[in-house]
Amino acid sequence: MTLHLAALHLAVALDGAGWHPAAWRESAADVFSARYWAGLVAEAERGLLDFVTIEDALGLQSTLTDGADDRANQVRGRFDAVLLAARLAPLTSHVGLVPTATTTHTEPFHVAVGIATLDHVSGGRAGWRPQVSARSFEARHFGRRAFPPLEEVLNRPGGADLSAHPHVRELFAEAADAVEVARRLWDSWEDDAEIRDVATGRFLDRDKLHYADFAGPFFSVKGPSITPRPPQGQPVVTALAHSRLPYEFAAASADVVYVTPHSAEHARAVVEEVRGLSADLRIFADLVVFLGTDAARRKARLDELDGAELVSDAAIFTGTPAELADVLLEWRRAGVEGFRLRPGALPYDLEQIARGLTAELRGRGAFRHAYEAATLRGLLGLPRPSNRYAEVS
Amino acid sequence: MSRRRVHLAAHFPGVNNTTVWADPRSGSQIDFASFVHLARTAERGTFDFFFLAEGLRLRELKGRVHDLDVAGRPESLTVLSALAAVTERLGLAGTVNATFNEPYELARRLATLDHLSDGRAAWNVVTTSDAFTGENFRRGGYLDRADRYRRAAEFVRLAGELWESWAPDAVAADRASGRFLRDADAVGEVRFHGEHFDVEGRSTVPRSPQGRPVIIQAGDSDEGREFAAAHADVIFTPHGSLEDGRRFYADVKRRLSRHGRRPDQLKIMPGATFALGDTEEEAAANAAAIRRAQVGPQTAIAFLEQVWGRDMSAYDPEGPLPDVEPDLSGGVSQGRVAIKDRAAVAAKWRALAEEKHLSIRELVIEVTGRQTFVGTPETVARQIDEHVQAEAADGFILVPHLTPSGLDDFVDRVVPILRERGAFRTHYTGSTLREHLELT
Ligand SMILES: Cc1cc2nc3c(=O)[nH]c(=O)nc-3n(C[C@H](O)[C@H](O)[C@H](O)COP(=O)(O)O)c2cc1C
């Protein structure tokens, strides 16, 4: 039965009461309580999952492309994801914590230091999902830049390929710069910069501190960081990507990419395209999942409650954990190394993942029996990177 | 008049020479365990809040990163959010710069912390006086004093609008009717057009337990005091001595009525250091030993260089003050509050050194301040209480000299006496920081 198949990696994407907009109707979730989130990450850790991601945006959720929709029947409101991840860190010991933080309106220095801090408080379990924000209504929350309405960007002649629009290209260029700055700042303290040398009175060896000296069209950052190098050296950078431009961003800037194939065949094609851009990138596929013997009925009921059939950028799966395991292993053979599952409803579908799916995969020799490493990099098989500024001795 | 209650806060040891790192008991300044130790000690002592300072650029001396003091801190709000998981009642105060942040983002981070701590968040609003720090940020540069407080005032007003934009009952989460929000108007739209900010839109965070996180101010200029009188719930001030404190206290409390506020709506909390001993003599000896550790030979020279504005590394720190004039043209120090009149300070130092026959190091020990409170636990408790009863303060932000154990003795030995005197709470009676601070 063993297929000489490397075990696969499993992550879950946490957001509100789940990825179905009506999910909150069917659960007791209080999405604005710390206890709710603590329960979710505890469940993920019981299932030995690699990491959880936490969604975020600098604007309220909306069914419209760009702007508030005034709907009162779906979850509205979110916590800052980095702070939420930090709140969960002391309550967990192995699972990775990967918050989303926007690169468009934030200060790269603050984001880099925030993620480094998350890595310190979690003992090396931090990741980051940098995300661009193209929406003009979010830009109005800052009042520093005027963006074209996103409908205009989408409806321009040439079709809906966002990547082709100069506005979008610029946002991705800025995101790449933000990640570059973060990586330089994380390295700006060498691991042994703190010497505490009583004889000379020196706390630091300042030859081991480095200016980031980044200058670009969007910002410049001098450095060094105010925070010592995080335990992982470089926290894990992850990116969601649906097309060529974000694939290129992920290949250049990220350690893990989440892609959204809709079949095994599609997965194979996407993997081939992404592999062509980067040999090292860990490739994860996103799937929205409704699990259990009555999964299809549950989803149908939620669709009915919401008054619309669920649509998603990612493939939507309904079925039993065993059936999902079949799909994951098939996609695994197509070259996908891990999965970021988006539970349709929380906590139900997360429990199905953490208990049913992991047991199923373990039975097939495709998932861990115990955490084998203490850091997120360790779980993902990513080496702790050497420091770009350190002199090789 | 009834007895005034003391308020206490714990300052995590900072990145200056107050923090002694060479002591064998000194632990990590960055490991989360250090933050947990100090926060739990403060909570055991029923302190009002735990406090983190911030500096957005490593300090430099003579164009190079200053290497003599502890350095390397985490992002304040991120650590506080983690501490919210391991404490229950302790207030969590973070210093965050108003010049190099944007209101929409910072307001939602603070509201998030307030939710995740069940109403224990505080923001110490600081401004920055140097373009040196600005080099790390999009905005760059800096604002002069009047402008940076105008920006800070607008910032706090706008943050307040965002915090209050969700109706208190906005989140209905009524599964039967399908109303997650009470109605379409439950989340108000903020429209703010000021000198520094043009912001329109809706906040993403429901109204937090405190409604408004506690606002702390830490700047001493007239503009800073005025800002505090208008917007702050707490002032963190350097004026810790009895006389100085009383003057400052009267000045600031007097300003409140102009803003339609009562004196008890702004708490004045000087930063305070301390040294304890079983006897007064032992405490005095401990205090002297701590000061010597705080001003090592190299640190003594570094202080001299900041005032003299030139390289003094050739001089013997244990020898006399050399006969050289200060260079008043530039300055050698970056990233700390500038010394205002270096010529006058140098003259004063020289006079003192000559009068008392002090070496460079002895001089620096003498002028960089003795501990605010020195004595047996009884003496220190009495002094703290007396300062508060005399309206020199509403309480103190204690700055220990050791990470992370520097508050252990205080909590074990001084707090019980403060409690016996009826000056300090024996247990938390409220759950939010506003309740601890009696801010209503
Ligand atoms: C007691 C005290 C603590 C301060 N702590 C900080 C701090 O942690 N971070 C910071 O950037 N500035 C800090 N400051 C600086 C002030 O925010 C302000 O920039 C400075 O005092 C100049 O303002 P002023 O002109 O009103 O005095 C502090 C100031 C005081 C008096």
Image: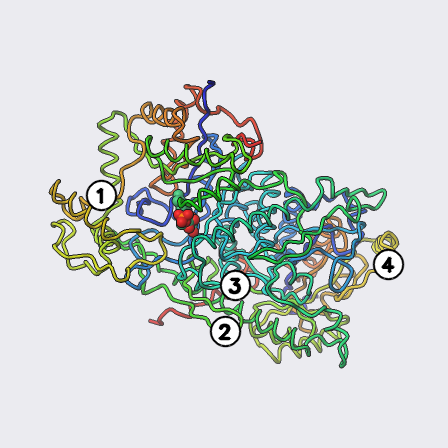
- In the image, which disc is placed on residue A108? 3
Image vertical order of residue B408 relative to residue A151, above or below: above
Specify the amino acid type for callout 3: Pro
- Residue on which disc 4 sits: A308
| Foreground pick, B133 / B179 | B133
**Residue A9 x, y percent position in the rendering:** 63, 62
Specify the amino acid type for callout 2: Gly
Q: Are marks 1 and 2 on the same chain?
A: no
Mark 3 and mark 4 lie on one chain; the one further toward the N terminus is 3
Quarter holding the C terminus of chain A? bottom left
Q: Are marks 4 and 1 in contact (CB under 8 Å)?
A: no
Label 2 marks which chain's residue?
Answer: A
**Residue B422 seen in render:** yes
Q: Are marks 2 and 4 on the same chain?
A: yes
- In the image, which disc is placed on residue B365? 1
Mark 3 and mark 2 lie on one chain; the one further toward the N terminus is 3
